[in-house]
Amino acid sequence: MPSRARPESAVDAPPLLRLRGIYSERLAPVSLDLAAGECAAVVGASGSGKSLLLRQIADLDPGHGEAELNGRRRSSMRGFEWRRQVVYCQAEAGWWDDHVSAHYPNRQAALDIMGRLGLAETKLDALVHELSTGERQRMGLVRALLQTPRVLLLDEPTAALDQAATGLVEHELARFLRTGAAVLLVTHSAEQAGRLARRSWRMDHGHMEPLWT
């Protein structure tokens, strides 16, 4: 598995994502910068507010504060324009069609990522209900990556996976970071945060505190 996926050059890079006082009724104000090529992590128990933070950044829930992408304010962009570049990948992806293939217009691009994630080609032609929880989780990540986002907001991306599949996902995320994109990772696992992120925070009852920098 990769260790410390963020390149050292990201330390001195200008912020790709900047948050200033993002908050909601159940989330205390959060301010942070995320550089191109950087993975940062938020750990904490279920219900602590981790997913609330990601949804706030993705502009999916009502809230306050300002976010910027490459210096451009979120408030100056339409919601779909922001969410096309700052993609939220929830723990259980939503499916609007019974057929898996209907969600992947670029079949070959999907198959390329699927292969790296240990998913057989036949899964693309299956029905959604025929996929296991772990397969649906990885296929959701495939969908998110195919959007070529600048920032990927990941909510427990390996919660349903065994060690081998988790390793494949982490390698794919390291590959994604090398493109100059960034990842904000929510995870229960401090060990996973240690492998992927250079900076990490703990969320507790909607409040974030740094674990290391």
Image (cartoon, helix red, strand yellow):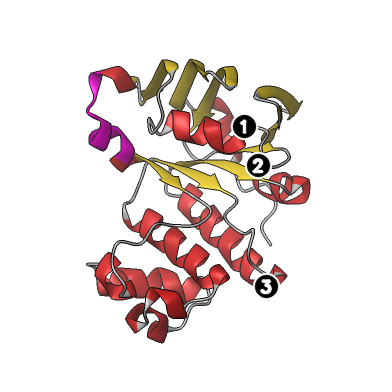
Looking at the image, which residue is at 51% across and 72% down?
Answer: 135
Amino acid type, mark 1: Gly
How many dots with numbers?
Answer: 3
Say if 177 sits above or below 27 in the image.
below
Q: Which residue is mark 3?
A: 164
Q: Which residue is mark 1?
A: 49
Looking at the image, which residue is at 69% across and 34% down?
Answer: 200
Q: Nearer the viewer, mark 2 or mark 3?
A: 3
Spatial CA distance of label 2 from label 3 is: 19 Å
Number of the label disc, if any, that sits on residue 197: 2
Left or right of 209 in this view: 125: left
Say if 201 sits above or below 155 in the image.
above
Give whichever of 13, 207 is nearer the camera: 207
Q: Secondary structure at mark 1?
A: loop
Left or right of 136 in this view: 60: left
Q: Is residue 196 magenta?
A: no
Which quadrant: the N terminus? Answer: bottom right
Amino acid type, mark 2: Ala
Q: State the extent of the magenta-drawn residues as a range.
A: 76-83
Say if 120 sits above or below 111 in the image.
below
Residue 194 visible somewhere in the drawing: yes
Give whichever of 7, 85 is nearer the camera: 85
Looking at the image, which residue is at 32% across and 38% down?
Answer: 83
Residue 74: x %, y % from top left: 32, 22
Amino acid type, mark 3: Ala
Q: Is residue 82 magenta?
A: yes
Q: Earlier in the sequence, mark 3 or mark 1?
A: 1
Q: Earlier in the sequence, mark 1 or mark 2?
A: 1
Say if 181 sits above or below 142 in the image.
above
Q: Secondary structure at mark 2?
A: loop
Looking at the image, which residue is at 41% across and 21% down?
Answer: 67
Residue 199: x %, y % from top left: 67, 33
